[in-house]
């Protein structure tokens, strides 16, 4: 179920609502592609043999990889009719709480915490927790801002 509003102007009525996304698998190919794109080739992400005897028992996803998946993990969790587009406005706070080992599945739980009107649209404050299937602690918690631009 998604957080829904009939227009950007009515989005504030949904403050406090939450929505949960689908599980998404993190495989070594994705970790490798992210390492290549960012040129962050630390062994903890890429060397399966060395990582097996390391602190996490396997390779782990980059924290920024998990963060970069927020658009994918939150897709469809907020439905606002009458929005011409939604753009990332920024981040207020991000905390990486637990690494995501290769083969894990993650999902997003998003809460709408604030809505502020502005000249370009409505800035929605979202608190998103990325859960790891079977883990007691989440991978990360991010406070993001989405700008909902009304259709003309």
Image (cartoon, helix red, strand yellow):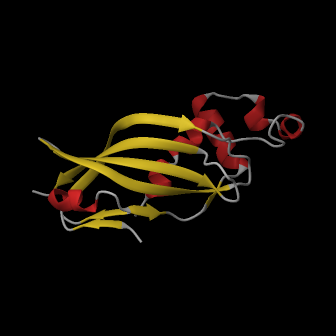
Q: Position of residue 35 (x, y in %)?
A: 65, 35
Residue at the image position 64 percent from the left and 37 percent from the top: 62
Picture residue at 58% right of the left edge, 41% below the top: 65
Report which quarter residue 150 is drawn in: bottom left
* Quadrant housing the N terminus: bottom left
Quadrant of residue 12 within the rendered picture = bottom left
Rendering coords of residue 133 (x, y %): 67, 59
The x and y percentages for residue 90 are 35, 36
Residue 10 in the figure: left or right of residue 38: left
Quadrant containing the C terminus in the rendered view: bottom left
114 over 15 or under it: above or below = above
State the residue at coordinates (61%, 45%).
139
Q: Nearer the viewer, residue 85 or 12?
A: 12
**Is residue 103 shown above or below 2?**
above
Residue 26 percent location from the top left of the image? 66, 52
- Residue 99 vs residue 95: left or right? right
Front residue (pair 116, 136): 136
Tell me how many marks there are.
Answer: 0
């Amino acid at each position: 179920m998604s957080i829904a509003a009939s227009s950007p102007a009515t989005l504030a009525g949904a403050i406090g609502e939450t929505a949960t996304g689908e599980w998404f698998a993190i495989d070594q190919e994705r970790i490798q592609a992210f390492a290549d794109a960012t040129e962050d080739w630390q062994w903890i992400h890429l060397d399966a043999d060395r990582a097996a005897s390391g602190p996490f028992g396997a390779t782990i996803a980059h924290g920024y990889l998990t963060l970069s998946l927020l658009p994918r993990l939150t897709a469809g969790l907020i439905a606002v009719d009458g929005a011409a587009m939604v753009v990332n406005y920024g981040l207020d706070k991000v905390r990486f709480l637990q690494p995501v080992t290769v083969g894990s599945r993650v999902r997003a739980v998003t809460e709408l915490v604030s809505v502020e009107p502005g000249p370009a649209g409505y800035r929605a404050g979202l608190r998103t927790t990325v859960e790891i299937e079977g883990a007691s602690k989440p991978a990360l918690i991010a406070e993001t801002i989405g700008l909902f631009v009304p259709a003309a």
